Image (spheres, helix red, strand yellow):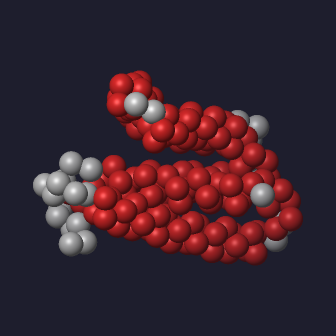
Amino acid sequence: MIPTLLSALAVVDAGFAGFRAAAGRDARIFKRAYFRRAMLGGGAAGAGVVLALAAATVAVLVGSGHATAEYAQLLRIGGRMLWVLGAYATLVLAALLIYATARAELRTLATVAILGPFTLIRPTVIAAATIAGLADGATAPAAALTVASSAAVLALGRALDWWYGRGFTGR
């Protein structure tokens, strides 16, 4: 359950990263299809990153000689990370629910008070989740996988921003 939740959060985050990277970079008036492609592309890239990290995790576990103990430790780390990431995701989803259902004034409030600032603190939240996950100590392979996973999520957001900044918008 923990790997599934973390993977789902990473893919959804990548979809939102695709949206953020595309926002403000296209002069079309009707942008729904453009943003949908950006979100689907980001989500697909996120799924690719999750699969690559899963393969790396399996390789590390098989090579460790203590696969069961390492996996149990990764589950504990992931469980602690979920407390931080889950709280963040819940607040973002609540703001998106307000944005999707409320009047224009409340949508603006949700954007200005929650979605904007939460986009800015996203790297800090990911770092805090990583620190919380590793707070009780970890073996070198478990710590390396945790840091690599968090770094990959952050790097994907930067890569999508670079991609859209260079004009690769998928027209």
Farthest front residue? 103
Could you tell me if residue 164 is visible in this image?
yes
Percent from the top left, x then y, of residue 123? Answer: 45, 40
Residue 56 left/right relative to 43: right
Please name the residue shown 65% across and 54% down the image.
6
Please name the residue shown 46% across and 57% down the image.
14
Please name the residue shown 35% across and 54% down the image.
19
In front: 32, or 116? 32
Q: How many marks?
A: 0
Could you tell me if residue 161 is visible in this image?
no
Residue 85 left/right relative to 64: left
Indicate the quadrant containing the N terminus: top left, top right, bottom left or bottom right: bottom right
Give the vertical position of 25 relative to 168 (above or below): above
In front: 41, or 130? 41
Give the vertical position of 143 relative to 66 (above or below): above
Residue 37 left/right relative to 168: right
Indicate the quadrant containing the C terminus: top left, top right, bottom left or bottom right: bottom left
Q: Quadrant of residue 15?
A: bottom left
In front: 102, or 53? 102
Percent from the top left, x then y, of residue 130? Answer: 60, 42
Percent from the top left, x then y, of residue 162? Answer: 26, 58
Farthest left residue? 27
Please name the residue shown 61% across and 58% down the image.
8
Give the vertical position of 130 relative to 19 (above or below): above
